[in-house]
Image (spheres, helix red, strand yellow):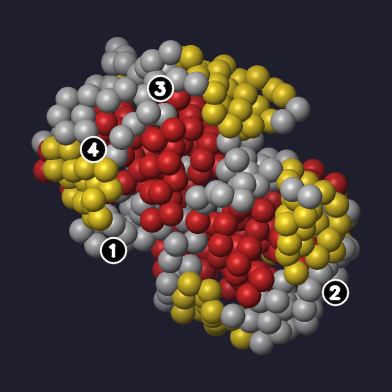
Amino acid sequence: MNITIRPAPLSGTLRVPSSKSMTHREIIAAALAKGETEVTGVTWSEDIEATVRILSLFGAAIEKKEGKEGITLSIRGGLAKQEGLLHADAGESGSTLRFLIPLGLSSGNHVVYTGRGRLSERPLTPYYDMFDRKQISYHTEGGLPLEVQGTLPGGAYELPGDVSSQFFTGLLFALPLADEDSTLRSTTPLESKSYVDMTLDTLARHGITIHEKEEGLYEIPGRQHYKTGTFAVEGDYSQAAFWLTAALSGGTIALTGLSDTSLQGDRAIVTLLKDMGGHIEKKEGRLLAEKSSLHGITMDAENVPDLVPAFAALAAVSEGVTEIIHAGRVRLKECDRLHAMAVELTKLGAEVEEKPEGLVIRGKPVLSGGTVSSWNDHRIAMALASITPKLTGPLTIEGAESVKKSYPRFWEDFRKVGGKVVEA
């Protein structure tokens, strides 16, 4: 689907979708608890559907109920060994794939993992090394499909922490179920640690004990049991970033559903935008942002890689120079996001210098309209849409359906706040 947006101020109130990162974690924890659990406030997306699909394949019973405050998932947990070879389709979700490979082993299943798009290109080497050390049988020609058979023992585990925190989350979910105690250690400084902290928070609320002895070293007692209950999912700061960007570009937008005490690393977007001169305040339980005069800053993306597209787009229409650093891993997402943002913003007249680990952006007051590609990446599409109030002509986005990966109602919400959107 291609859409065309005519520049217009964006104003109104929106409920932010539930955190995709937290939703994955809550559903997985519920699926590991023997008994009934409800996960409320879920925003459905292709990535969440992938996690539900594979957990169901492993033996969880998951029922979806629509409601005014989002979707409620009723989950009867308890994964178990299933007959035969299981075909687990992770779609395009890196979180789903990396979180659930260890759980396929915990449940003793023989699984072949598949996926689409760039998922097969995203690194899995830390797991291959782990399979070799633990004598777990696997087969791959490189990437996906990946066939894995065996069980996950307790014991000592070491992983590099500079590839993805998702490998740590996968093992932190699975190792408490092992018969023996375990240790999990990062052999490098642990990047995106905020995501691991979100995992630890989820585990604690579901009755699992993990001892963080020092940064990057975790002691994990075995033979633990996940507890059932009712758990609500908080709003997503990485999705809020696009609306904050849109408001600061031109308009006034109030966001509801965000937690002031969230452990999401992407909560840093509020501080980053305020540092640029953005007027953002908490008012009557809502996060309110309005059109502001902005200036460039240096953004360290090491722990907030998902914020790069929105931040880069806003930097292109802000005064002065912005530099995004420590962002090399952003190249390994649904697309090479550094290159994609450099290419598409340049089409609109922006001045962007691409570096191996980041971008240097020399801002301009306005950019032109034109035709851009989403690169089949939800965050690229939403980032480019968010700065349309600062364009001098219509913007056509090719592949606009890519938002379904994380935020299917994005274009509907865009219209709710005054966006002039038509299918091209």
As drawn, 386 above or below 211: below
The residue where tag 4 is placed is 220
Q: Amino acid at mark 4?
A: Ile
Q: Residue at x 16, y 33 (%)?
A: 181
Q: Nearer the viewer, residue 283 or 405?
A: 283
Q: Position of residue 245 (x, y in %)?
A: 71, 64
The residue where tag 2 is placed is 392
Q: Amino acid at mark 2?
A: Thr
Choose the circle earlier in sequence order: 1 or 4: 1
Label pair 1/4, CB-CB below 8 angstroms: no
Classify 10 Å Cα crowding around label 4: few (below 14), some (14-19), many (20 and above): many
Q: Secondary structure at mark 4?
A: strand
Question: Does residue 271 appear left or right of residue 196 in this picture?
Answer: right
The residue where tag 3 is placed is 227
Choose the circle earlier in sequence order: 3 or 1: 1
Q: Nearer the observer, disc 1 or disc 4?
A: 4
Choose the circle earlier in sequence order: 1 or 2: 1
In space, the residues marked 3 and 1 are separated at their CA atoms by 32 Å
Classify 10 Å Cα crowding around label 1: few (below 14), some (14-19), many (20 and above): few
In the image, farthest residue toward the front: 284
Mark identifier at residue 189: 1
Q: Secondary structure at mark 3?
A: loop
In space, the residues marked 1 and 4 are separated at their CA atoms by 20 Å
Q: Amino acid at mark 3?
A: Lys
Q: Position of residue 216 (x, y in %)?
A: 27, 55
As drawn, 352 above or below 64: below
